[in-house]
Image: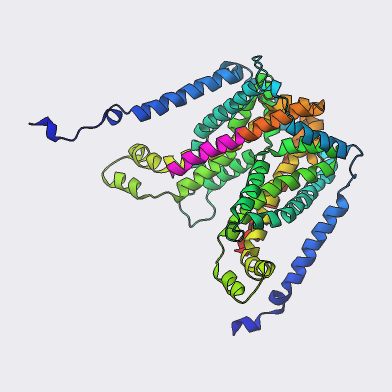
Amino acid sequence: MTNKVKNNWARHSWIFWGILVLLFYLWSIMGLNFSGLQESAGEVSKSIVEGLFHPDWGYFYDGSGEDLFSLIIQTLAIAFLGTFVSAILSVPFAFWAARAAKENKFHLRSTSGKFVLVLIRTFPELVLAIMFIKAVGPGSFAGVLAVSIHSIGMLGKLFAEAIENMDRGSEEAIQSAGGNKADMWILATMPTIMPEFLSFTLYRFEIAVRSASILGMVGAGGIGTPLLFAIQTRNWPRVGIILLGIIVMVTVIDYISGTIRKKLV
Amino acid sequence: MDNDLLPKRPFMQKYHVKGIGYSVLFLFLLWGSSIMTGVEWGEFFTNLDQFFDLLGRMAHPAWEYTNIVIQPIAETIQMALIGTTIGTLIAIPFSILAARNLIKNSVVRGIIRFILNLVRTIPDLLLAALFVAIVGIGATAGVWTLAVFSFGMISKLFYETIETIDEEPLEALRAAGANNTQVVVFAVIPQVLNSFVSYFLYTFEINVRASTVLGYLGAGGIGVYLQRSLSSFRYDQTAVIVLAILLVVIVIDAVSNNLRERLQ
């Protein structure tokens, strides 16, 4: 019966939302300047597809250290090292941001920690990479630093959520057996959350591999630099082989990491 | 005491072969990666003052630049909205074709899923670089980039949702003689609509974040100005842009999270 006496707003609110969404779309379509395709668009896409199907196999390995194989390994190294450093740095951030009790929405320590993590997460990774390039010079070390700092934003958040949702039973057990805070942390807290931490770190590694492959576009090492160069010089067979390399690399890493993560949790 | 009665731990367990092996492998990978990337922490700490000098210059934002930033920020949101919408529209038929419970033909499903997996592996900035080469510099390239990027993401989220639906309404409709289109319209869509809208908003959030840097390669939006300020060493302007990005991302996230909570 209560359903029948819905007020007018509840019954007609969809009109309001509909108009709002429509206005939002109108604003977007009007605001964008669709310059139209340039005349060469068809030709360029044709050569890209052609390049993809006739990749420049000679670039795969030539022993110079500037070939696809070495740079893919370098990209993986950037992602691996960056994620490792960021996983360690994220742990204190996570304990800072984790809420002690679920009831209170605002908690000075936890809320401030979460805010800092949001700041880190939103700061564009490319800008971070450029800032580190200013500090240590262009090269993969800048990429490692950018990945290490940027990943804290997401890993810290995931870790904090894992801490909030963990089972507190083992902590209590150590406490009732007379353990102090340090015992509790080493013997109960860390072992309980370790599998989840590892699983999130692997997940973040998958993402870091993707971002490491584009960080090179600003000069932070890895496969991105030759890729951008090949696109700018319209060397489509070269673009084709690099694209294939990235696709294979990401697929293999996703598969390996997925298999390990399934075993962990 | 007769030791033979006690169970013996095999060699592998007794000497922790697996644990030690994995640790050694891990350390080896770390060492190899540091060699490969030329890590020099000493250099990092000696040059840290330069990094802080840069941060210091960013700490004094050029507020008069705010007026110039508003228009490209709006363009960024517009690109994200249109891109996500186009991607979603393309994703819907693909997600239906990839769903295990709707398409029984495993060959079709396999091919579709293979294509979707391929699309998902390509990083967004790489797509931006390609589309800038194809359609030229400007917001159009950004829209196409985001469309392809959200297509890969949304189709996966959508087909996973479709696979979790309740089968019984479908069966009821089939028993009443409905064809495939009717089954989708009257039994599948009503069950998945809420999650679809929720995932659409989620992808929109991610695309707003992504679109802020696409312009770096010429694909429109605020990234163009980001690149300009960075290459002219105007870090005070960079600071304004980063703050604007921060504000927009936080607002969009809050609105989208609020709407998504209402949908559930």
Q: Tell which residue pokes out farthest to the left in this image.
A: B1
Which region shows up in magenta?
A: A249-265
Image quarter of the C terminus of chain B: bottom right
Q: Nearer the viewer, residue A46 or B41?
A: A46
Q: Quadrant of residue B98?
A: bottom right
Residue B246 image offset from top left, x and y in percent: 70, 43
- Residue, x 39% and y 26% (percent of image)? B21
- Image spot of residue A263 (x, y percent): 43, 42
Q: How many marks?
A: 0
Magenta-drawn stretch contains A256 = yes
Q: Quadrant of residue A58?
A: top right
Q: Is residue B109 above or below residue B136?
A: below
x then y, percent, for residue A180 = 32, 40
Residue A16 appears in view: yes
- Residue B212 included in the magenta stretch of the image: no
Question: Between A173 and B101, which is closer to the camera in this rendering?
Answer: B101
Q: Quadrant of the N terminus of chain B?
A: top left
Residue B206 is situated, as x and y percent measured from the top left of the image, at 68, 47
The residue sitting at the bottom extreme is A1
Q: Is residue B232 visible?
A: no
Q: Examine the residues drawn in magenta and state their main secondary structure.
A: helix
Q: Nearer the viewer, residue B248 or A235?
A: A235
* Residue in the foreground of this view, choosing between A195 and B186: B186
